[in-house]
Structure formats: C-alpha cells, structure tokens
Image (spheres, grey):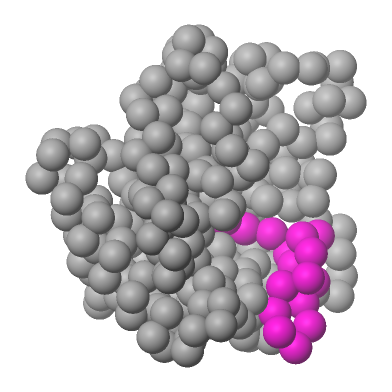
Amino acid sequence: MQRALFGPSGNSEEFYANNFKSTLQAPKWLQEQGLDAFEYSFGKGYIMNSETAKTLGEEFKKYNIHLSLHAPYYINFASTDEILLGKTMGYIVTGIKFLRNFGADRLIFHPGSAGKMDRKEAFLLAKQRIIDFANNLEEQGLLDGIYLCPETMGKSQQIGTYEEILQICAGNNHLIPTFDFGHINALTQGSLKTKQDFLKILNRSIEFIGFERTANAHIHFSKIQFAEKGEIRHLNFDDQIYGPNFEPLAEAIIELNLHPRILSESAGHQSQDAKEMKNIYENLLAQQK
C-alpha cells in the first residue's frame, strides 16, 4: 500500500540547533530523521535564481525527499484591481517554473480574500478565475506532472473554507486541495476533535473530486491559537489548550486508505512534530496487522 509522507514546512529550530545553516543540508538531515517530505516557502517572494533551485532540487531527489513549494502569500484571485490580478497569475506561472527547476510537483497557494467585497461574491469570482486559469495552463501543457493546491484558510474574510476549496478543485484535475487542518479548526472554533470530524471532510472531498485526488491530497498540520474571527498564531504540539490533535486524523486517513503528503507547520518545531505525526501514523498501521 502507498503510505502517507511526512516532513516539515521550512527548516525547524532543531535543524539550526544542530549547526546546519543552509537548506542544501536539509535533505540528508531529513532522511536521517526518518522524514520524506519538505515544503519550501516562497511566501515573501521568489528570491532565488534557477541554478540554485536546480541544485537544491537535485539534493532533495538524491535523498528521496518529496518536495513541494509554497507560492507568495499575497496572491489574490478575488482582486478587483486588474494589475494585481495580473501579478497573481504571474506568481503562479513563476511558481510553475520553479517547480520545474526544483523537480517538484505541487504548488501551494492562498486563493485570496474578500476585502471590501461581499464574501460570497468574492469566492465565486476567485473560484471561476482559478478554474479558468488552470484550464488555460493545462491547454498550454504547462501543468503536465504538476498539481496546483489551493489552501484552506483560517480567517473569516479569507477565501478557503474546505467546501470552497473542494468546489474550486472540482473544476480541473490538476487542482488538489491543501487541507490545512489547523486553519479549518481555527475557523470553525475548535470543531476538529474526533475521527468522525476528519472523516466528514475527507469523505466530502471524495464526493467532490474523487478518491484518487483525495488520496493524494496535500495536508498542512499544526495546532493554532484562534479567536472569534479565526486564526491568531501557529503553536506546536506542546500546547495543551488549542487543537487539533493528529491521532484522529491519522485514524481517518488509515480508515480511508489515503496516502497524502503531510507537512508540519508547527511554530519552530516542524521537524519534531512531523516525526511525532509519522510515529503516530506508523503505530496505528502496525496495530492493524
């Protein structure tokens, strides 16, 4: 059976505490930690040249670390400013070029925010633009071997409830969801507690986009502090106040026979918490034998 993959989003405090300084050193270290995935963030912009990207990509491939990239955070497919919308599309195209350079296969991005627009109107606008754009990129052959992964978001004015992300992903086979369960939990005021809570979302995904794309989904996981309007800040697994906990999600993934890529976005503890998630998952699998 295909298994879930685990790793950190970015380099953790533990990585630097071990006197590593460069992401070029991360692939070997991750393999030694028993991890098999990594997400490189271009959240603040594409500050890298293509040769560096190729060198990094070769190193990740050498150590069999599955690589994903996160596009700039300021993407907004609901923007009413045509210049900003053009920049948003440009960020995706540039991200695809970096995927090719890295030898990576999925680009994670935030769909956008409503701003002063009506929330429903903003979602419908962003949804159609993303689908039309993906269709256009597909027709040009730019998405061969690549997934674009819109992310569930954690604040009320951001576009990206899990239902919205699934509606977007239903529009093109190169779109797969990034389920950020910390964001979902924050937005829904701590609703994710049991296996059934996670099964509800994952079964809804199977209904919308089918088993294969759901099985191959991208997942961000961390505990997140929240208030009335949603996300405040990322925490790590040491926190005992806010959720969600990983074990119920692991149980749901195993029950449905899914094999997602799971990235820890814990605050500073990404690699430690990724290892803890993998241990939980492997122990649950072993109990089934």
| Front in this rendered view, residue 149 or 76 | 76
| Residue 210 found in image quarter | bottom left
Q: Is residue 289 left or right of residue 9?
A: left
Image height check: is 125 above or below 175? below
| Front in this rendered view, residue 170 or 207 | 170
Q: Which residues are magenta?
A: 220-235
Q: Is residue 225 left or right of residue 164?
A: right
Look at the image and tell me whether residue 134 can be seen: yes
Q: Position of residue 172 (x, y in %)?
A: 20, 59
Q: Position of residue 41 (x, y in %)?
A: 59, 39
Residue located 45% across and 75% down the image:
162
Q: Is residue 238 left or right of residue 218?
A: right
Q: Main secondary structure of the magenta part?
A: strand
The N terminus, quarter of image? top left
Image height check: is 285 above or below 3? below
Residue located 55% across and 46% down the image:
72
Q: Is residue 222 magenta?
A: yes
Look at the image and tell me whether residue 105 can be seen: no
Q: Position of residue 78 (x, y in %)?
A: 42, 70
| Front in this rendered view, residue 25 or 33 | 25
| Residue 222 found in image quarter | bottom right
Q: Is residue 211 magenta?
A: no
Image height check: is 52 above or below 12? above
Q: Position of residue 196 (x, y in %)?
A: 50, 82
Residue reaching furthest to the left: 139
Q: Is residue 227 left or right of residue 174?
A: right
Residue located 55% across and 32% down the image:
46
Residue located 62% across and 58% down the image:
221
Number of numbered discs present? 0
| Residue 14 found in image quarter | top right
